[in-house]
Amino acid sequence: MARYIFVTGGVVSSLGKGLSSASLAYLLQSRGYRVRIRKLDPYLNVDPGTMSPFQHGEVYVTDDGAETDLDLGHYERFSGISAKKSDNITTGKIYSDVIKRERQGKYLGKTVQVIPHITNRIKEFIKSDITKEDFVICEIGGTVGDIESLPFLEAIRQFSNDIGRKKTLFMHLTLVPYMKASDEIKTKPTQHSVKELRSIGIQPDIIICRSERSIPLDQRKKISLFCNVAIEDVIETVDVKTIYEAPISFNKEKLDERVLKYFNIKSKKKVDLEPWKKITNLVLKTKDKVNIAVIGKYVELKDAYKSLDEALTHGGIANNLKVNLVRLESDYLKPSEINNKLSDVSGILIPGGFGKRGTEGKISAINFARKHKIPFLGICFGMQMAIIEFARNELKIKNATSSEFGSSKASVVGLMNEWLKDGKLVKGTDQNLGGTMRLGSYEARLKKDTKISNIYKSLRIKERHRHRYEVNINFKKDFENKGMIFSGLSPDNRLPETIELKDHPWFIGVQFHPEFKSRPLEPHPLFSSFIKAAKNKSIK
Ligand code: GLN
């Protein structure tokens, strides 16, 4: 039977619960165990799909088409395990599920309540779809003390009673601040946060203390005493220079050892930290860099393009280069300034996006990349914008646009309501905006002897999608006559999946999101190739 590790956070948010969970997953895996990581989010949205990136950062898409929290991206990148729909649940999902059952009369006349009905449903979700895993790491979003997270905390408390305390471990991540004025490390916030947790019946087994500097023994003892945990289970995590160092640092602090000790089991294998040491070394020591412009609407927010930033870094790792991101807000990118703003970059990337705002800046930048033969990668919306640019300037369709921006006679990108998935027609005609896009992994067939098929070294690929609009296949011939090839199509030949320019060193657009599948230990070929092209450009 699986053992469950519940990860809660205290004092403040953004302490790195996701990264801690992901690192622990790697360490346990490396010791020979099967691990699954899940995230329980206390907000009322059914999923983050309808949230603005300003609210929630990136929406991470899984193979099976779930729109999930960006922490699932961390999990995948560190553990290498593909996340599933069942790995992310929200209060919204739980409540809508319970209310649906109530309407169906499934509660047999009972008054439906938070305890036990909501908590029972949460417990069912925690256990669902678990088969051979040795460990399930469950991260609870938010901070202890939030009203929203109470049902989740109550559910995990009950859960540990149900399956037995020996099969559950509570891990609490807190902040241990350093006060410059008095030159002191303060343990009080941790004490308060643990007190809060204990007041709802949860006694943490391991406390991870996030701190700017190393925590002296005296302070550790204090935390141990006041929070009722063994001194060995007060584990510090001092800020690392790169996130790739996290598994190394947690191992050094014996986190994985303490977890195994708690469950009274032995390591099956010796931990392999070599890949992370190599990457950390590379990332910290590499001096050569390449400037890549990322032009989007949410560039000011660090987390909005999390997987993309990571994938570009991985591309740099593959080429022994530091990738310097030049983030440009598309809304402020005036055509007259393009020359100036892009003169120093060796590659231009337009990521996914929604809505008309900022599109003209993107289109001008694409024109610049095309004309000046600068390596260009257009992802999803970026590919659609590349199509519009080419249609306007090469096919001379003056008003070429996307029907996403309003109805038009010149929609080279339009709404496509049906997609074939595993031989079946998927309809996206729902009026709702949530969960109704073409989501998840779909196959694309690549044309032989094209740049993209050489990069993938394959003619059949599977990548993750998240879009509602499609490039209109009826224009295929017109584009190809002018030198833009539709180098990848859906298996039924109806949906353009990839485009490239014949007469350009590296100009590729993809309707899918390759960034979701790139991993530090396995950089995605498209990003490695893009960065390589940018490197060649910067040398010239
Ligand atoms: N807005 C576009 C669409 O829905 C592109 C989406 C995206 O870039 N993820 O098709």
Image (cartoon, grey):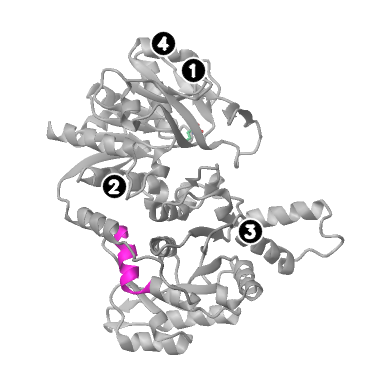
Q: Quadrant of residue 537?
A: top left
| Residue 496 painted magenta | no
Measured as percent of width and height from the top left, residue 402 is found at 49, 24
Q: Which mark is residue 224?
A: none
Element at badge 3? helix
Mark 1–mark 2 CB contact (< 8 Å): no
Residue 81 percent coordinates (x, y): 45, 52
- Rendered image: mark on residue 125: 3
Q: Is residue 371 visible?
A: yes
Mark 4 vs 3, N-terminal side: 3
Task: Tell me which label, 2 or 3, sits earlier in the chain.
Answer: 3
Q: Secondary structure at mark 4?
A: helix
Front one among 46 and 263: 263
Q: Amino acid at mark 3?
A: Phe
Alpha carbons under labels 1 and 2: distance apart: 33 Å
Of tags 2 and 3, the one toward the viewer is 3
Query: Mark 2 or 4 closer to N-term?
Result: 2
Q: Could you say where residue 184 lies in the image, as x and y percent from the top left? A: 30, 83
Q: Residue at x 34, y 48 (%)?
A: 310
How many residues crowd around disc 4 within 10 Å: few (fewer than 14), some, or many (20 or more)?
some
Q: Residues within 10 Å of mark 3 (few under 14, many from 20)?
A: some
Question: Looking at the picture, which amino acid does disc 4 mark?
Answer: Asp
Report whether 49 appears left or right of 306.
right
**Part of the protein shown in magenta:** 243-255
Q: Is residue 457 above or below residue 40?
A: above
